[in-house]
Image (tube, coloured by chain):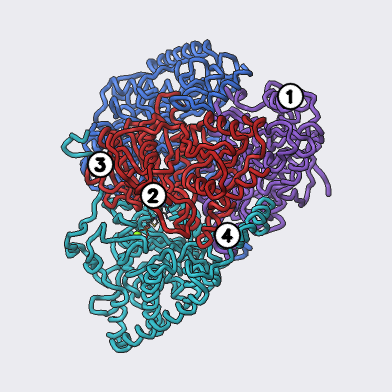
Chain colours: A red, B blue, C cyan, D purple
């Protein structure tokens, strides 16, 4: 398959286009996604190409967007909706967690809900408390949902296509700080672009990154880092800076979770650090740490460390103090190594 | 605090409380036949009268009058009567079954039988309802097997929902009956989405949403109105105003002015109020709305004015918050009695046939119950396989759940 | 799919898109003075005309006409004009400051200055606004210090919000200005709750909620309507219909029929539409609504019809979705120009004084900006103390947070 | 202070009454709470005693209930609202997590939000998936909220009063299965009443159970059980049945969390099991396990075990297979002891 350089925005857009072209059941809608093409431009051109009934603007009603999508999915379409920022999914939380997630189960398969909800997640753009949140743990606690989060254009498209083809509801969290380039947390340095990055090479046609499969971004023997989204790049930077031979696992899919890859790595390295941008307490890192110590206890030479956003709302001006950058990850790695 | 002479807010109160003698003689009910029949492509704003009045066909003496009085064949009317009687009998039996410990919970539709049963007759194959827990009539109207309903109610081994759902939260795709949610309101906007899907797909199917008066306060009522108002898809949004939520009367949901239908009118959506205890009227407005939707003329909101004559559910005791005899005083009468009178007047029915039908129906329901009980009851044994609780959450079971299933099997 | 001749749903489109020449000559704007002034205790259902028309006072020639034309003193009008000019200047400077990297984000109110500034004059000490991000006029109308606003915008060390909030999400309790949320709609029902509290407390204070046209689609618009309709507390619910959400025109929020005010009318709430670019008219309806609330006569919804002449925010480029000149074509004119004309006509103002005021105001805003920049800018140094991010989440810091603060201090 | 025998319903009702009598700012409202006194009768008599403006019925709009309460709290009242079942808090989740939790922080103290949201939680009453949920982890992940959950009448009243007097928003989860009596998970046995139970003795007047203080329900040296709500009674039963000398800690308050009591106990026993009724993945037990292994790693002789509801919606008929009863807890205890 031909390969093209794409930013993550382009990869998402291309993934949507590929699926809308292949499958007339795929419908895209959300706030500002139609004529304008989305505030992050992820749906640009889709209305023009596929028509107003396949890609359209919605009222500012997240519960309406998801509620309507559930009805469409029950009908037999494959709605793929955008929530403008993950911070704005809360009005839809009831429809997502109490309805979409349970249609199949409660009807014993009489109805299903193949539905994708895309939402830009995470901070790093001076968005303050309402444009920076990482709510993944609020989805992973809900039985019946799947939750994925790509760290690069190639996965962004491949996971999105897998999500759209999945027979169950999938939340796709897109780290907005990665839309235009990788970001290792060094905000003081010049912004990078996906050009030239191997994972910015995106196959043009239809392909999957199957849900539930982690990617090992760096092999290593001394320590395992479990992370996802923007933090994958931060972790890789921290590893280089600390000179630690760490294995960096990009989970990609939180539910289903690639337990086998995680456990094999920790059993090999004997040390583990979990890193995410969401607030620490009851974050998805808690689940990872709890599981790792449960299943790999006798291999662990140090407690599973967690590095995460502090337990406060994402502050506007102190964003970089809040963000768990390479220094903070580095310190956690050293602590795990020295323990 | 509270020392101003007149507080600047009000908490609405129903007219009558336990101990009061309910008297609705001052309530002005429009006469049967008084409300006009608008053209299908009427501009919603011209329906002001229809959103504030009540469309009625059956006169007190059983005569069907006015411009809406048409459409149903004799057979359909007779079968509608029979189905209402079946539903009422089912309710009574299931309430008793719950008291006997055969299930945990039941929701009756006493007094509201006409709404769902008359409405369903206006729908066609392939259309989809998004019902509440009080719309079993949609199934009964299609002669859905009573035994299957009871299997669900008893959570037994033949329960099509494998014991997972609270009793009466049925699901029946082939009967155009979407899986009922225990959370109020959510399904209303889903119905709008389903109708949008039908339009996008180019089919001629339509969706019908259902909501209670109390639940119109929920957010999803608004999402449904907003999406219906913007996209105008082929959907009928039914508000069943049975005057009560659990213990709160409709003034708490609605405030003390206007009507619920008027809320839809504010969104530029066609809105009509109908006498929900008048089988003919419900069917006539349903048919009108279905035809509009079918032809792409836009959504319609129907407010069915009725009265919840029974308890909210088997967990409820209405005598704690309203007069015992309020339902008798309710001015719109009993839907079964009213249709019966109409049919007798037309020579299609008689008291004798009615009594006979009642006993036949009793036998039918009892037989179904016996058959269902053979498959087990909630506490009486025969429950669905326990390990099945892990199945069917996802099409394919993820690893973490497979591990849990394995662990759980140690307890089997 | 999509092979039916006419799809049974519609996706509303604005009349004009980039490249089109906008022409609103067919839009019928009611004449100034044409709408009646109802008594304060009017029954909401009698306001049908008021919810569909537009209350206007200022004629094209600057004359104030009709039953609503009263009330503001010459000084108040002059100060209103001045404040609108200050707000416009502030906007221009802050947009520039954002481009210069002094802050991350700004939201202008270009073209909508009259709404908040005229409205605020009708409120009294102790009343509370629940504003959106586009209601800075409520502060400017009270001569809130510009430097303090800029300290917040620059997230500097004198930022009263300690750098925590996105620029323009001010909070000013003493000015009756509730902390602005970045989430749309949420504050609308909070305003209703605050007004209920005032009623429960027996005070005579009132609350004012604010929401944009686009945000009326959010659920909390509904909660606000429902609670206001049920309890009728002393609240004014302002819808600022500036025709656009971000890239979507009001037809996406509202559908293509009726008005937003009519939605409130459907709830039995008094609802009026007003020319939001007519300083006198906004003030007159505000005063009317305030008086109703003060006297315990119930809630009022005001739809301010205006036009967002600028970008949605500094992150937006409106030329991508609407004609460049659309704001010039907009039929309600510029609020500053219109009030200026009125004042000149009354001999209270002149072109010369206007030019002079403009340059004075420029100096004033520049001076405030200089002072604010001394306290730092977002990227220019002088940010609030970083460790302060742990403070003030709870009144008392819990142990888990104390531990995090200690850990964080390793990075300071 | 005089002491009375009370059920948990009576204790809650009495706590509300005490506070409404002491403080005119305390206002109680919710669905069916006014004239009728609540579907669980927790507010019975309050409207009659304190008037319709202090205790009233609301429309069925959870977001409206919480949204209005936030406005009232900002005004200076002390609203204490009821959500009829915890399963119905989702429509209010936006107002709870994005508004109430952040009013103080985002306004830098200019406004505050002293607000209590009570909700019956947990299963065991054949309520199916929409009357049985335990959503505590969805609150503990949200910075700015406090979350408490009593296991007995004495705490129910004392925590409620502390919550009402707290200057910040507090979620009070009331285990509905405990409303009328303690419940150790032996559903096959006759239902117990609070009569005769020492924690059913409730002081009549005003007192606090301060937030953030766990209670040790049973001292023991071999293993620490961290639990709360209904599961406290299940854990105590399991301990007796297994004959293990376990220390049973009733957390009572999840945020703020009594880290000191937890850590002291685990350092003493060297073994830890966490038990809750909520689904396992990303439950609050994950946070507890992650923390315990972080801070007590070198004292642990076995992995921290978790016993919880399975990761599926709460099924109606198979409720007792879903519920982590004393057998399942017992097995987790044995596994931890044998590890
Ligand atoms: C979101 C949500 N809130 C509250 C409830 C509890 N509840 C169940 S039924 C009911 C009353 C509903 O009244 P109405 O909508 O009038 O319907 P009816 O029962 O009269 O048919 C309430 C409050 C619920 N199921 N879901
Ligand atoms: C819950 C939520 N959803 C989406 C957004 C993103 N958003 C910010 S402003 C805006 C448009 C609002 O339009 P309108 O209500 O008309 O107000 P205006 O900007 O015109 O004043 C959108 C979609 C948000 N802030 N919050
Ligand atoms: Mg009802
Ligand atoms: Mg707008």
Task: Compute the Cα span from label 3 to label 2.
Answer: 27 Å
Same chain? Circles 4 and 3: no
For disc 1, the chain is: D
Q: Is residue D91 left or right of residue A292?
A: left
Residue that mark 1 sits on: D338
Cα–Cα gap, marks 4 and 2 = 30 Å
| Marks 1/4: CA–CA distance | 47 Å
Between the C-alphas of marks 1 and 2, the distance is 50 Å
Quadrant of the rendering where the N terminus of chain A is positioned: top left
Label placed on residue A53 = 3
Q: Is residue D176 left or right of residue C349?
A: right
Res. A179 mark:
2
Asked which secondary structure carries label 2, the reply is loop
- Number of residues whose C-alpha sits closer than 10 Å to that of mark 4, classed few (under 14), some (14–19) or many (20 or more): many
Residue topped by disc 4? D105
Label 3: chain letter? A
x and y percent of residue C102 in the render?
44, 69
Total label count? 4
Would residue A140 be found to the left or right of residue D239 on screen? left
Q: Chain of mark 2?
A: A
Q: Could you tell me residue C227's position as x and y percent?
A: 48, 53
The first of marks 3 and 2 along the sequence is 3
Residue C359 falls in which quadrant of the image?
bottom left
Q: Quadrant of residue C78?
A: bottom left
**Residue C405 to residue B167: above or below:** below
Chain letter of the residue beneath label 4 in the structure image: D
Which one is in front in this view, the residue at disc 1 or the one at disc 4? 1
């Amino acid at each position: 398959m031909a390969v093209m350089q794409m930013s993550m925005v382009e990869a998402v857009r291309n993934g949507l286009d590929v699926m809308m072209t292949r499958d007339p059941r795929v419908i895209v809608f959300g706030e500002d996604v139609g004529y304008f093409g989305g505030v992050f431009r992820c749906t640009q051109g889709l209305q023009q190409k596929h028509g107003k009934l396949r890609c359209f603007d919605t009222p500012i009603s997240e519960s309406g967007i998801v509620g309507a999508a559930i009805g469409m999915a029950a009908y037999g379409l494959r709605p793929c909706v955008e929530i403008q920022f993950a911070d704005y999914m809360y009005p839809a939380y009831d429809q997502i967690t109490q309805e979409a997630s349970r249609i199949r189960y409660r009807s014993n398969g009489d109805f299903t809900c193949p539905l994708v909800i895309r939402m830009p997640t995470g901070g790093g753009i001076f968005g303050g408390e309402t444009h920076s949140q990482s709510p993944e743990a609020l989805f992973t606690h809900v039985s019946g949902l799947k939750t994925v989060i790509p760290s690069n254009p190639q996965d962004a498209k491949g996971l999105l296509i897998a999500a759209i083809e999945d027979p169950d509801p999938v939340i796709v969290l897109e780290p907005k700080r990665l839309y235009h380039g990788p970001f290792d947390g060094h905000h003081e340095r010049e912004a990078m672009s996906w050009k030239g990055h191997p994972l910015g090479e995106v196959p043009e046609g239809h392909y999957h990154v199957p849900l539930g499969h982690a990617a090992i971004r760096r092999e290593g023997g001394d320590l395992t880092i479990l992370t996802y989204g923007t933090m994958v790049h931060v972790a890789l930077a921290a590893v280089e800076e600390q000179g630690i031979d760490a294995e960096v696992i990009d989970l990609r899919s939180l539910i289903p979770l690639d337990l086998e890859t995680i456990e094999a790595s920790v059993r090999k390295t004997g040390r583990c650090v979990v890193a995410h941008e969401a607030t620490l307490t009851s974050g998805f890192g808690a689940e990872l740490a709890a599981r790792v110590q449960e299943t790999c206890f006798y291999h662990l030479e140090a407690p599973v460390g967690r590095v995460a956003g502090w337990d406060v709302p994402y502050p506007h001006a102190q964003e970089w103090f809040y963000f768990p950058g390479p220094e903070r990850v580095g310190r956690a790695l050293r602590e795990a190594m020295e323990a | 605090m509270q020392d101003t002479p007149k507080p600047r807010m009000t908490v609405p109160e129903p007219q009558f409380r336990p101990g009061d003698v309910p008297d609705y003689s001052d309530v002005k009910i429009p006469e049967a036949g008084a409300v006009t029949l608008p053209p299908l492509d009427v501009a919603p704003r011209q329906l002001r009268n229809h959103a504030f009045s009540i469309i009625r066909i059956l006169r007190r003496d059983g005569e069907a009058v006015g411009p809406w009085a048409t459409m149903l064949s004799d057979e359909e009317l007779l079968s509608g009567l029979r189905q209402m009687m079946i539903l009422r009998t089912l309710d009574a039996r299931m309430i008793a079954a719950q008291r006997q410990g055969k299930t945990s919970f039941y929701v009756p539709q006493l007094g509201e039988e006409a709404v769902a049963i008359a409405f369903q007759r206006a729908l066609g194959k392939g259309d989809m309802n998004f019902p509440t827990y009080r719309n079993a009539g949609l199934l009964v109207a299609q002669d859905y097997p009573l035994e299957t309903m009871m299997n669900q109610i008893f959570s037994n081994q033949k329960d099509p929902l494998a014991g997972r759902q609270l009793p009466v939260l049925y699901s029946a795709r082939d009967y155009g009956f979407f899986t009922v949610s225990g959370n109020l309101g959510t399904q209303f906007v889903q119905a709008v989405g389903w109708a949008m899907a039908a339009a996008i797909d180019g089919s001629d199917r339509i969706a019908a949403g259902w909501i209670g008066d109390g639940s119109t306060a929920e957010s999803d009522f608004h999402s449904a109105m907003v999406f219906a108002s913007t996209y105008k898809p082929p959907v009928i949004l039914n508000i069943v105003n049975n005057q009560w939520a659990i213990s709160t009367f409709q003034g708490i949901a609605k405030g003390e002015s206007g009507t619920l239908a008027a809320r839809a009118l504010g969104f530029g959506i066609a809105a009509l109020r109908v006498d929900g205890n008048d089988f003919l009227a419900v069917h006539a407005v349903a048919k009108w709305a279905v035809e509009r939707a079918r032809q792409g003329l836009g959504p319609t909101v129907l407010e069915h004015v009725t009265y919840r004559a029974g308890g909210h559910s088997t967990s409820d005791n209405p005598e704690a918050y309203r007069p015992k005899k309020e339902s008798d005083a309710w001015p719109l009468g009993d839907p079964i009695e009213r249709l019966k009178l109409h049919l007798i007047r037309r020579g299609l029915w008689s008291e004798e046939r009615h009594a006979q039908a009642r006993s036949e129906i009793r036998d039918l329901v009892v037989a179904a119950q016996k058959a269902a009980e053979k498959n087990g009851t909630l506490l009486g044994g025969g429950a669905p396989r326990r390990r099945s609780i892990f199945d069917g959450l996802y099409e394919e079971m993820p690893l973490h759940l497979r591990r849990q299933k394995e662990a759980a099997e140690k307890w089997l």
